[in-house]
Amino acid sequence: MKTGNSIFFDALRIDNSLPIEQKAVDLWIADLNNPMRWAVRPVLQLIFAVLLHIVWFFKRLPLPQFSAHKLLQKLICWFCRNFVSPEANQLILRHYATESNALNFLADNSPGEAPSRVNLYPKSVDDMIIDSFVDHDQELFRMIKELGHWVSPEHPTTPENLSWQSWRSVDTESYSLPVKRTQVFDFESSHALFMCLFCLLLTREEYRDAINGFNLDQSIAIRIGQIIGDSTLVEMAYNKYPLYLVGPWNLGHRFLMHGFFTEYVYARLESLRLEASGLDSDSSVKIPA
């Protein structure tokens, strides 16, 4: 994979201070090398940030609310299929799997009656029409609600005693992603184009909840960190304080950091799973020594 003359990108590929799979790092560096990110993204983010706040204001007016989930999903999948780069599409599909795994791990290893598991593991862009972005948010809220009040365990659970019943390793090689010449948009540019559609085609409450759901990253990190005995996991959560609700300002950055968080959690837990299974994680997961 080419990185031009950037020794910084070479350093990023080698750095293993944060837990993250090497495949995710390679995909992100490829996305960073996309010329659209540097030439077009700043303009798109400026234009659509202004438009997003206009739509946000319109949706907050005391008017009848409307939503169009199916239309939203079809438009996003059509755009991903035809205009989003293969690397960005893989990162999007990975995010479904990494967050589903984190939530299912909590369900498998939390005390009390376990809620039904999250089953959002799309393997292609078309799968996302069913495993929808809307369900992705709603399943997060359902899981936290059904897990109930958190009770910190007296002692961390040892790797061999952790339950991996609902765990699915992320295999990007199994993704079905045909490549087209028109697929040129990077991850962040694509999100800039998506965010106004989300605001318009969800009710104001659905959209408000979706953009504030990122802050549950801190809650998830606290719970998983206490289960496995890793206090550093909380530092991986950029989005914090779920009781403090925010609007769409800085949404693109917050969304991106949410994606990094689920990648970190997945890699940290996958290393524990492999350790408990007696398997060698080789170089696929970058874990600090």
Image (cartoon, rainbow, N blue to C red):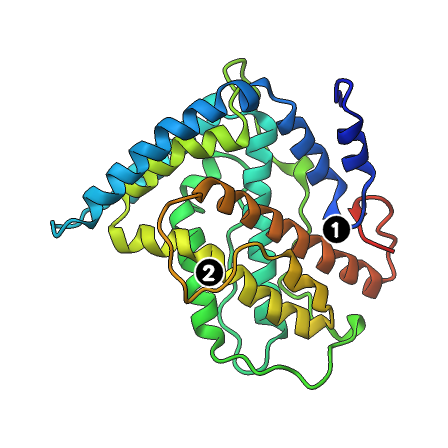
User: Residue 266: in sight, yes or no?
Assistant: yes
**Closer to us: 118 or 217:** 217
- 226 relative position to 4: left or right: left
**Residue lying furthest bottom in this view?**
154
Q: Residue at x 76, y 75 (%)?
A: 161
Figure check: 58 above or below 79? below
In the picture shown, does residue 144 fall above or below 43?
below
Percent coordinates x, y for residue 275 in the rendering: 84, 62
Callouts 1 and 2 close, C-beta under 8 Å: no
Which corner quadrant holds the N terminus?
top right
Q: Amino acid at mark 2?
A: Leu
- Can residue 123 be seen by looking at this rendering? no
From the image, which quarter does the C terminus lie in? bottom right
Q: Is residue 2 left or right of residue 226?
A: right
Q: Residue at x 19, y 42 (%)?
A: 58
Q: Position of residue 174 (x, y in %)?
A: 65, 37
- Give residue 234's position: percent from left, percent from top: 64, 63
Is label 2 in a helix, a strand or a loop?
helix
Q: Which mark is residue 153?
A: none
Q: Under tag 1, what secondary structure?
A: loop
**In front of the other: 286 or 67:** 286
Give the residue drawn at x 54%, y 50%: 258
Where is 130 relative to 240, above or below?
Answer: above
Q: Residues within 10 Å of mark 2 (few under 14, many from 20)?
A: some
Q: Which circle marks residue 18 in the picture? A: 1
Q: Which residue is mark 2?
A: 140
Q: Residues within 10 Å of mark 1 (few under 14, many from 20)?
A: some
Q: Amino acid at mark 1?
A: Leu
Q: Is residue 186 above or below residue 256?
A: above
* Horizontal side, residue 111 vs residue 280: left or right: left
Earlier residue among tags 1 and 2: 1
